[in-house]
Amino acid sequence: MKNSVKLDADAANQTLDSAIRTQAQIVLESPQWDSVTLNGYLISGDDKALLMELTGKPKIRLGALPNSSCQAQLYAEQRYVFETKISATPQWGATQAIAIERPTTLRVLDRRQFARVRLAPSSTVKLEWTSDGLARRYTATLLNISPDGLACRVEAPVAESIEAGGILTSRFTLPQTESTFNVESSVLNKTPTGEGPFILGLQFVRSQRNNEELLRLRKTLAGRSPVATAVETFA
């Protein structure tokens, strides 16, 4: 799947548990349903199954759905997708629910507006932020970049000291150019790779201070080859 990154089992379980607690929105769809979607929100779950309460009146016979395979899109802090199977369609009173098999992995969809540009393996970005009142600096591996954000790889202790949703400064020089950029960025997400490091998804902050830098970045990136595969694109 293009523009996505696969979460490991631990990260997927944490995401699902959080989605259940917050009753996140979920949508089920299948090519066999003639463009009908099943919309609802999570109300409970265990290590085997997830239970969603339906909203609206779907134009499909629910009694025929058990054992049907489908794709789920989960809208929590980000948008996730996973393959699953419907195990039951319980109903009590006016409440119609659907039980689906709990997945072992999730994919995070990249929400960025622009295609990302592939960079050389040696590319880096210098991050500067404040944690516990102290100024922090770290040189991360720059994975890919677009006019509205970038993805970089950091070690786990560094990721733990960076607050999701926080603001940091990202400084980088694009390969094969002499252009250096200094941009305020917000931490969109922190995704564990399952092998120790984390992937940080940064979104450039639109502000009077940043606008000139972002316009210059867009012009510099114009014409470069976009990322071609899902492996190279991170949320």
Image (cartoon, helix red, strand yellow):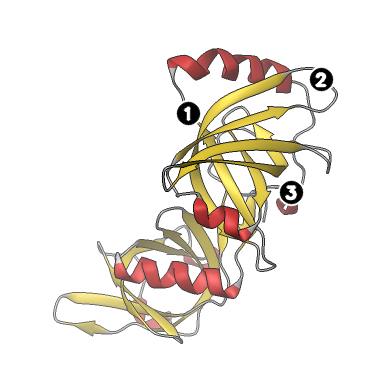
User: Quick one: 141 or 226, which is closer to the camera?
Assistant: 141
Q: What amino acid is found at the position of numbered circle 3 in the picture?
A: Glu
> Residue at the location (54% across, 67% down)?
82
* Residue 70 visible somewhere in the drawing: no
User: Which residue was labeled with disc 2?
Assistant: 177
User: Which residue was labeled with disc 1?
Assistant: 205
Compute the Cα span from label 3 to label 2.
Answer: 22 Å
User: Tag 1 or tag 2, which sits nearer the N-term?
Assistant: 2
Percent x, y of residue 75: 41, 56
Percent x, y of residue 211: 51, 16
Count neighbours of disc 3 (C-alpha within 10 A) and say few if under 14, some if 14 to 19, many if 20 or more.
some
Q: Secondary structure at mark 1?
A: loop
Q: Is residue 74 left or right of residue 149?
A: left
Count neighbours of disc 2 (C-alpha within 10 A) and say few if under 14, some if 14 to 19, many if 20 or more.
few
Q: Secondary structure at mark 3?
A: helix
User: Which residue was labeled with disc 3?
Assistant: 232
